[in-house]
Amino acid sequence: MMPAPRYRIAFIWFVVLAFAANALPAAERLPGKSAVASASPLATAAGHEILAKGGNAFDAAVAITAALAVVYPTGSGLAGGGFYLLHRASDGRDVMIDAREKAPAAASRDMFLGPDGNPVPGLSLNSALAAGIAGEPAGMEHLVKEYGRLPLAVSLAPAIRLAHEGFPVSPHLRAVIEYKREVFAKQKEVAPIWLRKGAAPALGTVIRQPQLARTLETLAKHGMRDFYEGAIARRLVAGVRKLGGIWTAEDLAAYRIVERAPIVGDYRGARIISAPPPSSGGIVLVEALNILSGYDLAQLDSATRKHLIIASMRRGHRDRAVWLGDPDFVEMPVAELIHPYYAAGLRASIRLDRAMPSAELPGILPAPQGPQTTHFSVLDAEGNRVAGTITLNFLFGSGLVVPGTGLFLNNEMDDFSKKAGVPNGFQLVGNAANEIAPGKRMLSSMTPTFIESPRGLMIAGSPGGSYITGMVLLATLDFLDGRSAAEIVAAPRIHHQYLPDVLQYERDALTPNEIESLTKRGYTLRESKRGWGNLQVITWDYASGRVDAASDPRGEGEGQVY
Ligand code: DON
């Protein structure tokens, strides 16, 4: 019943304001605190340093990216690429900067196949041919020019300092250097920095990188275009070609980032904002959540709940293999794949009492097809956010440094489907959509994601290749279940990627009863002794105002709230 006329206007205003307050997007609330979670405490500190200087989350993202290139080159570097998912608080804009590497113009579909028609082992991983044209510097430049507040030189300063002054070798880094020892020993600019008397340096040894510091200083002085068209570009092209690669000056000069609209979905009242193609992440994540939205997971026993999560991962990854690639090259039924009706059809193929083998899923076409990587999450006090996943692909990329630059070359070309049905380094199979073509971006699994729910906000992402999207899916479900940031990053994980048709699990992820119940359903289970991923999560609880930042205990990173 409407109130008396004289109260009517006030009443209408009350309703409008109450509605507006309820519907207020996260962008218009102020966290009042800033937070950073990254794979390295030094990179987290670099982000904080820039926030404290008056930078926003986007400036911090530049500082963190540059710092990671110095102190965490196993995961990412300037001669690599990545995706930056952004949220700008002033206008609520969500956008993804696609700074993914591109195949050089001289690349061709069969470039990694030998005379027998099969991939030459290691060629797409350990050679200069493995390197795509880097996108990370262009991504950083775009962050500074379009979204940041501080000059590039200011945001690069912490990284330059870290490159000059050095940083101590951690247990993880030591293990990875040991793994790459032989490749490093053969390169005269690499061995003196990363090895001591031919061996991996002792823990705590300080690693200084004067050449990388000079490269960063040049970029700070002349801008990131120098990487693509200046002195550094010339050094890169000469160096890559000397190492046997096919980069040209034209490839570098032509590189451009692309701003892409994120994949957006809805799961039980939460808004999912995630990476669009050329990442498969957002589509697989939303498709899996759409499938799961037909069940009340909280009411199910834990084995059935995990069975359904795995069933949704399997189907999402199957569609990745069949449909996805670079949107600038292939037509993809994106709207259909993330449509709730499509998920309803897939749900109909799921039985609660048994697993459906991947081979029984229709549609894989045998046509020509087409602690590594790192993620950081940043939230500033105004509500700007960045979920950045950046990569060289595998550890230290190809392990090859371009002489005179201090930069490790990525081996992202392995993310292409080199031959129909032949698995890549992550055992992922692809289709024509992801075959190599000049100038094309290789399909990625990187899944930088924002989740906005009535409870609050989560910013999340991880390295882990084919495991990434499943990790973000589990993190999303945990967040919506009310878990804290620390619980989310620590929780044991399960995984299925369609092929190989195996349910992988970390120790403690499945109880003996669940193992028995899932085995009865027909799963092939495999325990991973080492685990996977390095999830970096920030959560912001709207009701209490609490902001938390947590870094995966499997890594050596740090989450900090300021
Ligand atoms: O873009 C991708 O999907 C891969 N290049 C990511 C590699 C990765 O996460 C390595 N981490 N273990």
Image (cartoon, grey):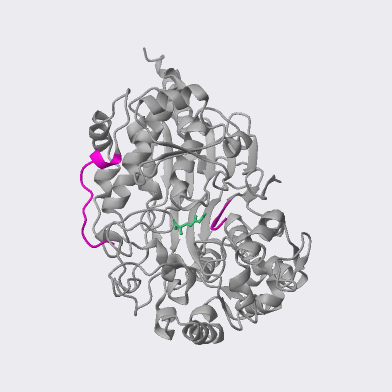
529 to 39, vertically: above or below: above
Quadrant, the N terminus = top left
Residue, x 53% and y 79% (percent of image)? Answer: 227
Most distant residue in the front direction: 116
Q: How many marks?
A: 0
Q: Nearer the viewer, residue 363 or 427?
A: 427
Q: Is residue 372 left or right of residue 122?
A: right
Q: Where is residue 27 drawn, in percent x and y?
A: 51, 44
210 to 48, vertically: above or below: below
491 to 465, vertically: above or below: above
Q: Is residue 320 left or right of residue 257?
A: left
Judge whether residue 150 can be spotted in this image.
Answer: yes
Q: Nearer the viewer, residue 299 or 543?
A: 299
Residue, x 28% and y 29% (percent of image)? Answer: 350
Judge whether residue 151 can be spotted in this image.
Answer: no
On whether residue 368 falls in the magenta region, the answer is: yes
Q: Is residue 14 left or right of residue 523?
A: right
The region drawn magenta spans 358-376
Residue, x 61% and y 41% (percent of image)? Answer: 31
Q: Where is residue 505 drawn, in percent x and y?
A: 49, 37
| Dominant secondary structure, magenta | loop
On whether residue 350 falls in the magenta region, the answer is: no
365 to 238, vertically: above or below: above
Q: Where is residue 421 drawn, in percent x and y?
A: 29, 56
Q: Nearer the viewer, residue 514 or 483?
A: 514
- Quarter assignment of residue 251: bottom left
